[in-house]
Image (cartoon, grey):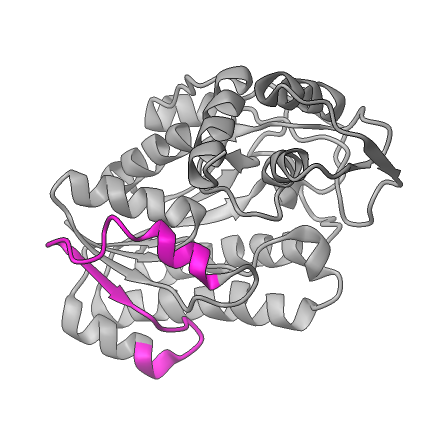
Amino acid sequence: MKVLVTGGAGFIGSHLCQRLVSKGNEVCCVDNFNDYYDPAIKRQNLKDLTGQSGFKLFEEDILDIEKIDGIFSKQRFSHIVHLAARAGVRPSLDNAVLYDKVNIQGTINLLDMCRKYDVEKFVFASSSSVYGGSRKVPFSESDKIDRPISPYAATKRAAELMAYTYHHLFGISVYALRFFTVYGPRQRPEMAIHKFVRSIYQGGPIDVYGDGSSSRDYTYIDDIIDAIMTSIDRVNGYEIINLGDSSPVKLSDLIELIEKATGRKPSKNQKGFQPGDVFTTYADIKKAKKLLDYKPVTDIKKGISNFVAWYKDRNSI
């Protein structure tokens, strides 16, 4: 296979590129190394891939349609895995226009390239945020989701709809994978687990939003990569698929697990619940089991331990 991975220098993307290359596939990574977080972190993510046969890096923006067209015209991909996005719920509240451009127009650009160059297989990252503030749990792909509570969530749902349109009109097979709070080595630095661990080792307090009763369906990176790899092999028709652990963890319990893994107990800054955040996420993964033989195997205790070990090694602690 010859696979284009957009956002390939990021957390999930770099893990996917490594897995694809290790299996003998040709991989082209497109990433614009934007400053949402330190671009040096993204370059470090690709350190082990740089110079390997079967891996090419294109430092381009998916909004630059001429540059993207040039890549497609020369490379002739069999599959697209579209992970590039403007990430984060809270920042989207202040910059909805940017999120609209990157997450919707950027996706349309790639779908249009698939149409133009006859690429028939398209896998992309959606998000559990599309379920909004639903209290119906677990979240199922068949749930009605017409009330997103952040611009980020709205753009991810819009991308799903646009992908369906291209499937219907042009026969492109699409799997839209709704990720549920992915974590593990290389997790983005602004995400909760990474922030908590970093603050603890730096001797500072941690910010706790709400009373600790909110919960997330944390999903370990290796389980996500397994599912993406199977999706690449099996993508056919149009499907929306939840990818979570199906075991929500309360914020207070998460903090306790991190305290045990680090051996340190931080002070806490208690803060109010944040606009745009949802109270809980909880994935119904029956469809993923059926279509992808999906079976997450890394529980939260082991996953946190793995992350803390990686963080300590990365920062020589």
Frontmost residue, 14 versus 202 = 202
> Would you place residue 96 above or below residue 41 in this image?
below
Left or right: where does residue 12 sit relative to residue 101?
left
Q: How many marks?
A: 0
* Residue 58 lies in the magenta-colored region: yes
The image quarter in which residue 254 lies: top right
Left or right: where does residue 75 sit relative to residue 36?
left
> Would you place residue 287 above or below residue 163 in this image?
above
Q: Residue at x 65, y 38 (%)?
A: 192
Frontmost residue, 15 versus 165 = 15
* Residue 183 lies in the magenta-colored region: no
Left or right: where does residue 240 sit relative to residue 205?
left
> Would you place residue 186 above or below residue 223 in this image?
below
Q: Residue at x 28, y 77 (%)?
A: 69
Return the x and y of residue 225 as percentages of the image width and height.
35, 35
Q: Residue at x 75, y 28 (%)?
A: 266
Magenta span: 39-67
Q: Residue at x 41, y 44 (%)?
A: 12
Return the x and y of residue 104 as percentages of the image width and height.
53, 65
Return the x and y of residue 303 as percentages of the image width and height.
49, 23
Residue 304 seen in this snapshot: yes
Left or right: where does residue 133 sit relative to residue 72?
right
The image quarter in which residue 195 lies: top right
Return the x and y of residue 60 as percentages of the image width and height.
36, 73
Residue 7 seen in this snapshot: no
> Would you place residue 192 above or below residue 291 in this image?
below
